[in-house]
Image (tube, helix red, strand yellow):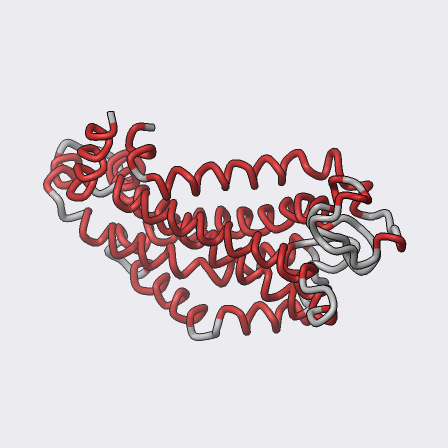
């Protein structure tokens, strides 16, 4: 905690992400009914007008539903898609990377070619093509985005393992008769994990933007489900008359992405012993 407190921007980012996570978990439990109930008297209600209740502090949408409640509820779908895609791609990509990096046989040559095949297609274009053929559901969106992100973890893990497997402690474990499974999961994976955690934090922001882009294009999650990207898309026709329909969900996307980038930068510093001392010195000065 002292290291986090030493970096004020990272601390603010963590607080914001905790608030977003709590909204994603508990928001639909209390506000889902409000977000699906039209109120034509509040149609395109301007922000900061509390005459219709505090839920309309950010204004109302084209059907009179409070934007604040919809942004809170939409956080769940946005976070679920991003988290599911990142976790799935990290597990699959890391496992394949460990095999490709430690194996000295044919698997070490074939698996990297799989990453090359996936990376030969632009990730967003691949997602557009697949979702055009499949139903644009949450599960399909997670699968498509996860597939496009697997090469990132695969190639990173493989590059790290190729270097780590030649270190002295791995050689010593091999000489002492440790099994391949034990060497990979007990000695190599803990060294690679900090790098993967930093990449996953940064990748979370990218996947969230990709989901928002797909929803904006109309091939992501469809109504009555809502995401921040879909809210921006629905508010686009009203930009000249009701700018707040796009502004507030767009601001939520920007702030969440910015917070994830700040957290990723903090993790990169904390997990690097050569740079961590700067935060430790900063924490001691604050104390």
Residue 150, percent from left and from top? 44, 58
Position of residue 198 in the picture relative to residue 220 (left or right): left
- Quarter of the C terminus within the rendering: top left
User: Which of 60/132 is in front?
Assistant: 60
Question: Which residue is most to the right?
Answer: 40
Q: Is residue 133 visible?
A: no
Q: Point out the residue furthest to the top here.
A: 287
- Image quarter for residue 134? bottom right
- Residue 259 is left or right of residue 287, and the answer is right
Residue 75 pos. (x, y %):
63, 46
> Which of 130/104 is in front?
130
Along the line of sight, which residue is nearer the eye, 122 or 284? 284
Instruction: Please tell me which residue lies in front, 146 or 239.
Output: 239
Q: Residue at 35% of width from left, 47% of height from top?
A: 198
Residue found at x 89% / y 55% = 40
In percent of width and height, residue 168 lies at: 10, 41
Please tell me which residue is depicted at 50% across the width and 49% down the height of the picture.
88
The quadrant of the rendering that contains the N terminus is top left
- Image coordinates for residue 265, horizontal then vertical, percent: 32, 49
Q: Is residue 126 above or below residue 162?
A: below
At horizontal 26% and vertical 39% (from top left) the residue drawn is 270
Total count of labels:
0
């Amino acid at each position: 905690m002292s290291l986090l407190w030493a970096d004020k921007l990272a601390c603010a980012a963590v607080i914001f992400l905790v608030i977003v996570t709590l909204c994603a978990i508990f928001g639909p439990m209390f506000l889902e009914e409000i977000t699906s109930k039209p109120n034509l008297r509040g149609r395109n209600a301007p922000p900061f007008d509390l005459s219709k209740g505090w839920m309309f502090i950010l204004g109302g949408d084209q059907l009179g539903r409070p934007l604040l409640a919809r942004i809170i509820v939409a956080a769940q779908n946005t976070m679920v898609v991003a988290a599911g895609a990142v976790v799935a791609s990290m597990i699959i990509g890391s496992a394949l990377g460990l095999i490709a990096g430690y194996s000295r046989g044919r698997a070490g040559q074939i698996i990297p070619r799989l990453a090359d095949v996936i990376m030969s297609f632009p990730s967003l274009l691949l997602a557009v093509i697949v979702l055009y053929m499949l139903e644009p559901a949450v599960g399909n969106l997670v699968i498509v985005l996860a597939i496009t992100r697997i090469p990132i973890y695969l190639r990173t893990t493989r590059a790290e393992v190729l270097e780590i497997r030649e270190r002295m402690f791995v050689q010593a474990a091999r000489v002492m008769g440790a099994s391949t499974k034990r060497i990979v999961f007990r000695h190599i994976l803990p060294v690679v994990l900090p790098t993967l955690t930093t990449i996953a934090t940064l990748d979370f922001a990218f996947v969230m933007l990709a989901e928002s882009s797909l929803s904006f294009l109309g091939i992501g999650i469809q109504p009555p489900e809502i995401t921040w990207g879909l809210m921006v898309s629905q508010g686009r026709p009203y930009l000249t008359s009701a700018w707040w329909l796009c502004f507030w969900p767009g601001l939520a996307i920007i702030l969440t992405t910015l917070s994830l980038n700040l957290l990723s930068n903090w993790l990169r510093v904390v997990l690097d012993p050569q740079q961590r001392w700067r935060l430790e010195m900063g924490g001691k000065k604050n104390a």
